Image: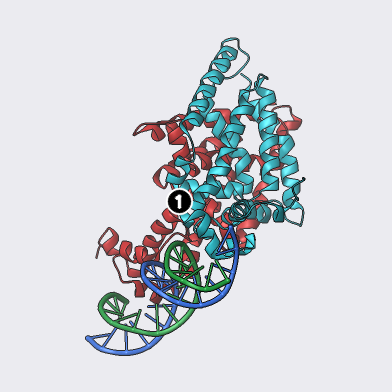
Chain colours: A cyan, B red, C green, D blue
DNA sequence: GTCTATATGTTGATAGAC
DNA sequence: GTCTATCAACATATAGAC
């Protein structure tokens, strides 16, 4: 028996979680209303509490699901057995593609990190942190070797990762400003990102050279 | 007659605005409470409405004051008659210094841009936007000339500005994560920023070379 | 201008029928 | 599991004394 596709086919808990994701990400946790989530899920408000007890716990579930696919993905892309240049291409492509589909995601993540740090920290397991530390260590060794050989400029991996991720986050995180200041018109932002897709990897790679 | 210094010496309206700044920036507009602002200002809640009528208008006043010093400062630094390399040094230094003093500022600005785009747009005057467009045009010409002469890699100014600003914003915008993942310990973040102060300008300058 | 007291409207959360 | 009805708590905003 094939499961019916679309929202209607999912079980209620998933429908609520998806709706909560949509509303929390768009409005921010503090700006979100349980009523709007219920409407979005096509259920009653009381049902939200039946499945998740409190808004706080629902917010936690939403952030957890997002975080669970975020750091691991970065670690997978940066940990692959490819040259650093190819990794940059992969990460920029993956992030810009994802954010194009979910434009409010960067703003939401930053918002949560700023105003609900506890929730953000709780969503990252010790294994995840450890995996990242391992990755950073391996990358740093790799880079140091290249530096020694004169093929690369000296650089701290943590600093580079922040710059890399931040460069993908930023245009979406302040999108209204980008549109107003740089990219007017109906498809202005789209064009801005299309251009970034080409320029950003080239820019970052140039910075790697000795 | 010398005015007494400190909070107590300022007139009430300013004290309220300063308090609102503190609370809004720290909690986010939606998470902020008028009561907390009143407490912070050392006045009664009713007085907030006497001076600013609504929370919305108070939030507008706070964001406006912040925005008024933000874009102009960037334009001033990037528009000075110095080489691009020196401008990078100046901007990175100015932002990292400011954010060290006001760590919640980047998160707040992103939060407002994401969840209250109208307010953000209203806070930027047409003159400001025009000034930025003029600056971008001049910089682009300058760069194109250098590219022609083979001294610089081709680059779009708007893209570079986002990367530059984003690289300064990002570590503060996700500070709890940076601390947990990269910079543990009491002064870990401080050290992270101190290192960034050196690495980031060098990194960006390397990316400019042809 | 500044306060106390209160009104007004939301919002998260629960009780209880079905 | 899902709904309707309702509560209790809170937050913004106002009225009115001083």
Task: Give the residue displayed 71% in from the left and 56% down from the top.
Answer: A8
Task: Give the residue displayed 41% in from the left and 35% down from the top.
Answer: B189
Q: What chain does mark 1 sit on?
A: A
Q: Quadrant of the C terminus of chain B?
A: top right
Is residue B76 visible in the rendered image? The answer is no
D10 and A114: which is toward the camera: D10
The residue where tag 1 is placed is A115
Residue A108, image x, y percentages: 56, 50
Q: Is residue D5 left or right of residue A176?
A: left
B92 and A196: which is toward the camera: A196
User: Up-down: is B10 above or below B142?
Assistant: below
Task: Give the residue displayed 51% in from the left and 52% down from the top.
Answer: A59
A39 and A48: which is toward the camera: A48
Q: Is residue B197 left or right of residue A161?
A: left
Numbered circles on residues, count: 1
Residue C15, image x, y percentages: 42, 69
User: Up-down: is B160 above or below B25?
Assistant: above
Residue A19, image x, y percentages: 62, 56
Q: At numbered mark 1, what does the secondary structure look like: helix, strand or loop?
A: helix
Is residue A190 visible in the rendered image? The answer is yes
Q: Is residue A196 left or right of residue C11?
A: right
User: Up-down: is A21 above or below B203?
Assistant: below
**Picture quarter containing residue B78?**
top right
**Picture quarter containing residue B11?**
bottom left
């Amino acid at each position: 028996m094939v499961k019916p596709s679309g929202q209607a086919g999912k079980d209620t808990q998933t429908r609520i979680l998806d709706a909560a994701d949509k509303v929390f990400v768009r409005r921010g946790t503090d700006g979100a209303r349980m009523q709007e989530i219920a409407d979005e899920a096509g259920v009653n408000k009381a049902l939200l509490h039946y499945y998740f007890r409190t808004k706080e716990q629902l917010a936690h579930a939403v952030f957890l699901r997002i975080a669970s696919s975020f750091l691991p993905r970065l670690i997978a892309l940066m940990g692959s057995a490819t040259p650093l240049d190819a990794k940059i291409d992969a990460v920029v492509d993956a992030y810009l593609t994802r954010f194009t589909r979910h434009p409010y995601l960067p703003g939401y993540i930053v918002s949560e990190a700023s105003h609900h740090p506890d929730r953000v920290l709780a969503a990252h397991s010790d294994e995840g942190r450890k995996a990242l530390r391992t990755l950073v260590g391996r990358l740093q060794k790799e880079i140091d070797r290249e530096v020694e050989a004169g093929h690369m400029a000296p650089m701290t991996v943590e600093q580079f990762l922040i710059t890399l991720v931040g460069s993908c986050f930023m245009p979406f995180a302040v999108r209204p400003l980008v549109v107003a200041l740089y990219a007017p018109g109906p498809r202005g932002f789209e064009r801005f990102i299309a251009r970034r897709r080409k320029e950003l990897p080239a820019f970052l790679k140039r910075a790697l050279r000795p």
